[in-house]
Structure formats: C-alpha cells, structure tokens
Amino acid sequence: MKHSTAARALRPAVALVAVCFLVLGLFLALPAHDAFALTTDRTTAKSNEDGGKSVIGGDPTRLSWEGTVGADETVSSITLEFPADCRLADDAYVKVQEIIMDDPARPVHDESIVYTEELTPESLTLEFANGLRANNKVIVQVYGFILPAVSGDYAIGVSYVDGTGASHDLGDSPAISAVAITTTQRIVNWLSEQEWVQAWNSVKFLNIFLNPLWIVASIPNLFFGWLRSIGLVLLGFPLAIPVGLGISFLRMSKLRVLRFISSIYVNVIRGTPLFLQIYIAWFGLPLLGIKPPDYALGFLVLAMNSSAYLAEIFRAGIQSIHKGQFEAASSLGMNGAQTMFFVIIPQTIRRVLPTMTSEFILLFKDTSLLAAVGVFEMMNFAKISVNVSGNMTPYVVAAGYYLLVTLPLIRAISVFERKLAASDGRETPSDSKKKGKGDDKDEGSGENTAPQTKRVGLFKTIAPLSAVDAQPSPGITPEQHDSQ
C-alpha cells in the first residue's frame, strides 16, 4: 500500500521530465536560424520646427538611419524603403559615414567610404564598393527629406545584401513621429519669402535681436513658460503675505527672544542673494533626503524670500499709524487683537499697497532665476529656443512677456498713489505740475478747511489736529482748553 502511494506521488514529476525532454528534442530538430549580419540601431529625423522640437511633415528635414554590422560579417548594399507620400527637396542629397569601432572608447568617423546611391522619393539604395566591415557602425543621412504633411508615425523599411549575395529583410525601423504644419510655421514660411524681411535680416543687429521669423516662432513657444512664471508668483506671493505679517508682529514683540529670532530671519534673507537661496534649497535639501517637486520648491523659496521684505513693509506701515488710532479703538472697548486686525491692519494695507505691488513685480521678475536649476519657466523656454536657433530674439520676446505684466502694474501703482494722496489732502509732484496759478485757492475765502474724517474698512480714521486747532482759543486758559 505504501509503495503504490509513493508511485502515484512520483507520476507528476516523471511526466514533467518527459515533457522537458520532448521540448528539447523538438528544439534540436528545428533548423538553425541565421543571425542577421546587420541590425538597426535607431532611425531619427531632425526637428524642423522654428522655435520648437517637433518634426513637421511637409517641410524638409534630415533623415538619419544607424545600423551595426555583425561580427565576422560583411554588408555589400543597404536599401531603405520610405513611407508612402514622402518627397525629396530639389537639393536633397545623401551622406554616409562608417564608424570604425576598433577601439569602442574612441570610435573613428570615416567619410571616405566608397559607395554608389540611387535616391528616389520611394527608396534609397546604397552599393558599397568594398563592403561594410564587421563590428563597425554605419550612419546614413538623407538631407532634404520630406515626410507626409499629415500627423502620424512613419517607419522606414530596411533590407540589405550580405557578403555572400544573400538578401535579408530587417523589417520596419523604429517609427518617426511627425506633426502637420502649424499655423505658426505657415506664418514663418510666408515671412521667410518676403523681400522686406530679407532686407531687415540683412542688418546684423536686427537679425540677431529682432528677427521677425524668430519673433513669430517664439511667441507661442514662450507663452506656456510665461503662464508657468505667473503661476509660480501667484502661488508664492499670497503665501508670503501672512508669513510676512506674522514676522512683522514678531519684530514688534515685547519679548526680546522673538525679536531676535525674527531679526535673524529678516536680515539673513534680505542680506543674501535669492540665487544663492535657490541653490541651497535645490542642492542642499536632497542631501537631507528631502526632494520636493521642482515647482513646489520653487514657489516656496520665492515665498520665503518675499516674506522677509514684506515683514519690513508691514512693520513700517503699522508703526506709521498714529497712536491716536489705538487710543480711539481702546475708548470703544476694543482689546489689542481687535484693534490690530479691525483698525490698524486695514489702514496699514491701504498705505503699503503700492509698496506691496512693487514687491510683487520684483518677485515676478525673480522667477527667471529658477531657470538656473532646471525649472521650466519662461526664461528656460527662451534659453532652449536660443540654443536651437543661435539667435537672441527669443530673449527679446521673453522681455516683452515680462513687460506685459510689469508695465500695467507700474501704471496701477502710480494711479493708486495719486488717489491715495488726493484722499489724504496731499499732492503728488505730477499733480502740482498740472495745477496752474488760476486754480490756487485764496486764503480766507470762507472755504471749510477743517480736517475731515475718512472711512477705511469698518472704522473712521481720526485726522491729526491742525496747527490752529492745537492752539487755545482767545480768552481760554490752556487748562480750560485741555478740559474741553
């Protein structure tokens, strides 16, 4: 009984061994598969989009195919089959290089290879007089190659003939992605044909800094970077406002320890370059095992930097409020917190709003420093476009994008300051220039010159006493004046 049980337990193992021997026998019985003497490494097309990285169909580009000859093999010819609807420019030509890999660490490019070519819109056939040597690489480049003007992935068919005369089909190479021509590229192509553009670009300065072709190409390319820069400052600045306000309270605290800590923070941040702060955050935090996303770290660094400046702005604004405001709030039964948040801070914000707007403008321009650590904001987009084009025009376009934000804000600051000065009964220098002698008011005209109260938020501000109000009335002693 025990023997029969053991035999049944061994049956699955015996069956598995039998199946393995059967598979091995079938594998040995199959004919050997010939290894290819040539393999495809990659197939690429150079970007032909002005200001971008895309391959646009319908415009000439450079097609490149790279392959490797196997060990102890030779190749006598190579044929590249192009996708349907491909075309060749009038000045299309072929360039072939053999890369000698005797020392893989130091490959040698040999352009003296002898070959004959047959180039048509359908295919390219290369016949090598001495054949391609074993273990070497070959690069075939077709200049003036035009992919179909329809978005899609296009593969190149590859076949070859080895040293024995046998033909082999390698199938399709890795596909090349192409996009249909964009509106921007159509405009660029149209401008490139205009005589006035050619005359304009004939002037070296205008060609380098104000090239119309690169202006048109850079505007849509930099637009997304511009939006990212705005997003960084719109996230960082609102975060900096409450942090800066809290630090300003610490700076005015009665506790020396809090004043000391907040003073160190403000002085260190304001006393070191933002560029250095960015580098410390980007390359120092990873050493501690902290690696936040680039954009999150970017607006946090901007917020920390701006909070130090806003702290001093708020502190100066709060301390500029007349102490009579505190006394008036206290007489209404308010405690210190209520006085600060409902009376002092609304007036402070009204006074420091122009300065805060200036800080916002500075912070927006400082987003360009993040390009140094690889954050893809507008300056990084412009730098890539300059590297692609070899032209400085994308930087000029970037300057225009910055001015789209900064100039309206600067104008808004001027208008607000004039309105603020008018509400306080003061004149800005521009207003005093506009005012003529005929507009001067005669003293003693009977016009009421008593100081007016002005409403800010929920409470009225108390205007300071004039010099006349501060003097006792005739026939009244100073003691009686004070009592009144």
Image (spheres, helix red, strand yellow):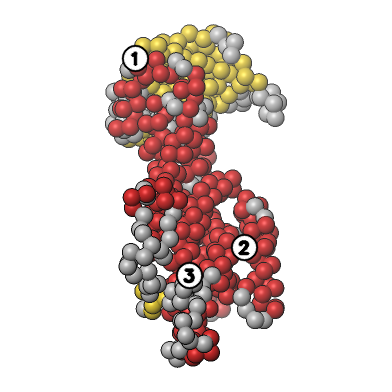
Q: Which residue is mark 3?
A: 348
Q: Residues within 10 Å of mark 3 (few under 14, many from 20)?
A: many
User: Quick check: 154 above or below 285?
Assistant: above
How many discs mark residues in the rendered view? 3
User: Quick check: 453 above or below 232?
Assistant: below
Q: Earlier in the sequence, mark 2 or mark 3?
A: 2
> Does dot 3 land on a helix, a strand or a loop?
helix
Which residue is at a point 40% across and 11% down the rendered structure image? 91
Indicate the quadrant containing the C terminus: top left, top right, bottom left or bottom right. Answer: bottom left
Camera-nearest label, 3 or 1: 3
Q: Is residue 92 visible?
A: yes
Residue 476 x %, y %:
48, 86
User: Quick check: 216 above or below 406?
Assistant: above
Amino acid type for the residue under numbered disc 3 = Thr
> Does dot 1 land on a helix, a strand or a loop?
helix
The reply to whether discs 3 and 1 touch (Cβ–Cβ < 8 Å) is no
> Does dot 2 land on a helix, a strand or a loop?
loop
Which residue is at a point 67% across and 63% down the rendered structure image? 267
Residue 294 x %, y %:
54, 55
Q: Which residue is mark 2?
A: 290
Q: Earlier in the sequence, mark 3 or mark 1?
A: 1
Q: Which residue is mark 1?
A: 195
Amino acid type for the residue under numbered disc 2 = Ile
Question: Between marks 3 and 1, how big is the CA–CA gap?
Answer: 59 Å
User: Which residue is more in the foreground, 338 or 402?
Assistant: 338
